[in-house]
Image: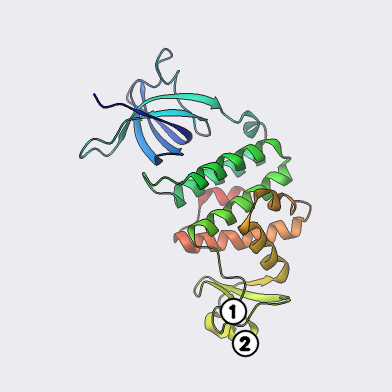
């Protein structure tokens, strides 16, 4: 008999299916992102205790994929926390929703990545415990760290066209086309590249390296947070070739 594997899991999305079942998108620590069917999940006396909601953290039971099957079979989900304070603030909930959108965009089915799982859980716990301004900053840090981990954070230490080291930057162009900074002499390489300040370059480099606490320290500077959000939105949109709908609510 095929046995299920137990693993820590974060519910990213949940859809009702038929009368009592659900389709779940889970980010798991040991199996990566899993897309599976939870049969009978909405039965109160079942292994899913009445159903699973997005942003619940717990332990999932996952069966191996059957040959030719599109969905994994899920055997149960025991909730550890649903991060209740995220839902007490619209601002915190919007940040958490954007984190989920980033996880869906930057993770792959059945490609385990313990770093990303732990980062996501840490970010949600921080967002839950922070005030709304700090939560916004944590969201910026999480996005930058995800880009860095995936290899998509822009080159910020030198001009990507001529190789000149970026020192004492006051303003520069950040080119999605070329993959990073363009110095004053190389602006013609991408005339449409948006201009960024030295403060944005320094902050983006710092929060991309982590930890998430580094982003919290940006919280008091509203202008810098706003500029970083605009910069990250533009960069992530280019990387994914589409905007994330959750970004508009931040």
- Mark 1 touching mark 2, by CB under 8 A? yes
**What distance separates the C-alpha of mark 1 from that of mark 2?**
10 Å
Q: Residue at x 71, y 42 (%)?
A: 132
The quarter of the picture where the N terminus appears is top left
Residue that extends furthest to the top in the rendered view of this protein:
45
The disc label shown at residue 114, or none: none
SS of the residue under disc 2: helix
Percent position of residue 230, x then y = 63, 61
Residue 38 located left or right of residue 155? left
Tell me, yes or no, if residue 67 can be seen here.
Answer: yes
Residue 205 against residue 2 in the figure, above or below: below
Q: Is residue 167 left or right of residue 68?
A: right
**Label 2, on which residue?**
185
Q: Position of residue 212 (x, y in %)?
A: 65, 49
From the viewer's perspective, is residue 13 above or below residue 244? above
Residue 90 in view in this figure: no
Q: Which residue is mark 1?
A: 159
């Amino acid at each position: 008999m095929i046995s299920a594997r137990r693993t820590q899991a974060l519910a990213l999305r949940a859809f009702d299916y038929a009368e009592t079942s659900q389709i779940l998108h889970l980010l798991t620590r040991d199996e990566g992102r899993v897309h599976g069917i939870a049969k009978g999940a909405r039965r109160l006396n079942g292994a899913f205790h009445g159903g699973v909601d997005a942003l619940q953290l717990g332990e999932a039971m996952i069966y191996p994929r059957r040959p030719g099957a599109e969905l994994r079979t899920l055997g149960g989900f025991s909730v550890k926390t649903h991060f209740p304070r995220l839902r007490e603030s619209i601002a915190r909930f919007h940040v958490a929703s954007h984190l989920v959108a980033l996880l869906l965009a930057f993770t792959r089915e059945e490609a385990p990545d313990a770093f990303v799982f732990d980062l996501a859980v840490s970010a949600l716990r921080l967002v839950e415990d922070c005030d709304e301004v700090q939560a916004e900053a944590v969201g910026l840090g999480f996005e930058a760290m995800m880009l860095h981990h995936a290899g998509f954070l822009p080159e910020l230490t030198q001009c990507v066209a001529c190789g000149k080291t970026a020192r004492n930057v006051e303003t520069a162009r950040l080119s999605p086309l070329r993959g990073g900074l363009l110095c004053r002499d190389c602006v013609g390489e991408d005339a449409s590249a948006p201009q960024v300040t030295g403060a944005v370059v320094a902050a983006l480099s710092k929060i991309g390296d982590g930890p998430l606490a580094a982003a919290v320290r940006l919280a008091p500077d509203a202008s810098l947070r706003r500029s970083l959000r605009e910069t990250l939105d533009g960069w992530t949109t280019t990387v994914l070739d589409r905007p994330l709908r959750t970004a508009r609510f931040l």
